[in-house]
Amino acid sequence: MQESTDKMEIEPSREPVPDDSLTSILMKLRNAEEKLLTNEPDPFVELSLDSEEPVKKPEKKQKKERGKKWKKREESKEQTGEEGETDKKPKKKQENYTHFFSLPLHTSEFKEKATSVMESILSKLDDKMRPLFRRQNVDQIHITLSMLSLKDEGLKEKARAAFQAKEKEISELCKHPFNLSFEKLGVFWDRGRGKKKMPRVIFLELKQDENLERLNKLCHIIISEMLANGVIQQKDLKKMNLVCDKTTNLFSPSNYHVTLFRIKKRKYGGGHSDTDIRQVLKEFEDLEFGTFPIKRIDISTRFAFDLDKFYLPLSTISFKEDEEARIQVKKVQEEVGLNELTTI
C-alpha cells in the first residue's frame, strides 16, 4: 500500500493546460513553425494562435482602390483604344526639332545695334545677376517663323520641295523694300510667383505696321503649304506656338520676336528680386531700335552653321528687288544730293 502511494506522488499531473498559459502558447508556436517548414505558406494568409486553421487577412482599402483604378483604366483602353486614367500625369514629351523657318537679321547694321542694346542692359545689372544673362550670338540673330521636325531624308526632301514650290508667290509678296521695324523690349516670364518670378527670355518686339501684315501673309503661305504636304501636322500647331487668326484666317506665330537674352535658372533668394529686373527693363520701354531690310527666308538647320556663321540653310528663297521702288528711291536720293542707295 505504501508503494502505491509513492507511485501516485511522482506521476505528473494530467490536468488540462489552460489555453492562455505560456506552455499552450509555446506549443502552438512550435506547431506553426513545423507547418511553415513542411508546407509552403500562402503569402495572403496567417496562422492563428487560437486555431490550427489559417485565417485570411482582411483586404486593405488601398489595395481595393488600386484595383478599381486598374479596372477602370483597362475598360477605358477597350472602349477607346487609348490609355485610360493613371495615378500620375504623364510627362510631356519634348519634341526633337531639327530645323526652323527663319528670317536672317545678321547684317552689320543690325548686329551693331543689337550689341549696343545688350551691353546697355548688362551694364545695369550687378555681379550676382549679370552671369545669369546669356547673350544671343549676333552672327545667328533671326526671327523664327516656325519649328520643324525633319528626322529623315524623306521629310527633308518633302519640306524642301513644298518650300520651293512657293518661291514665285513668296518673292512677289516680299519684294524689296521689305523692311521690319523693332520698337521695344519684351519678356517671356518664368512660372514663379511674386519675388520668385524671373524673366526667361528678353527679346525685341516688332512694330505693328503694314510690313508686319506682309509678314503674316508670308508665314501663312509657308505653314499652309507644309500642312498640305504633311510636313507639319494640324495637331502640332499649338505646341509649335502657331495660331490661326479668327478675323483674317491666317496662320502665324503667337509672338514674333528677336531673342537678345536667355536667362539661366537660379535658386531664388538673395541677390536681386523680380522688382529689380522690372526696373531695369522699364528703362528700355521707349526703345526705338530702328527699321531693317529682310532679304531672304531660310529653312535653317539647328546646330549646324555656314561660312558666314549663320545657320546652315536646307533651302533658301531670296526676295527679288522691286525695280519700280528702286527707281523711285534713286530719284529721291538724286534730289537730295545722295549718290549711294543706302536704303536698299
Image (spheres, grey):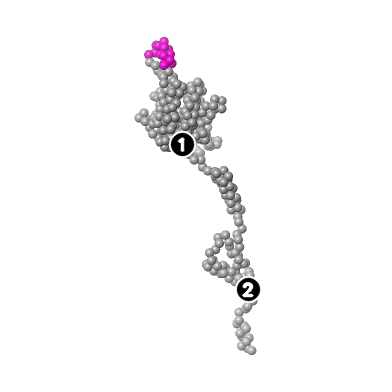
The amino acid type of the residue labelled 2 equals Val
Magenta residue span: 323-339
Nearer the observer: mark 2 or 1; the answer is 2
The magenta stretch spans residue 44: no
Q: Dot 1 lies on which element?
A: loop
Tag shown at residue 264: 1
Nearer to us in this view, 100 or 191: 100
Name the residue rendered at 41%, 26% in the picture. Answer: 317
Type of secondary structure dominating the magenta stretch: helix
The magenta stretch spans residue 334: yes
Residue 43, image x, y percentages? 55, 60
Q: Is residue 304 visible?
A: yes
Nearer to us in this view, 293 or 226: 226
Name the residue rendered at 62%, 87% in the picture. Answer: 4
User: Is residue 213 placed above or below 89 in the rendered structure?
Assistant: above
Label 1 Cα neighbours within 10 Å, binned few <14 / some 14-19 / many ≥20: some
Residue 10, image x, y percentages? 60, 82
Q: In the rendered structure, which disc, 2 or 1, sits on the residue that comes first in sequence?
A: 2
Residue 58, image x, y percentages? 61, 58
User: Is residue 94 placed above or below 14 in the rendered structure?
Assistant: above
What residue is shown with label 2? 17
Label 2 Cα neighbours within 10 Å, binned few <14 / some 14-19 / many ≥20: few
The amino acid type of the residue labelled 1 equals Lys
Name the residue rendered at 46%, 36% in the picture. Answer: 264
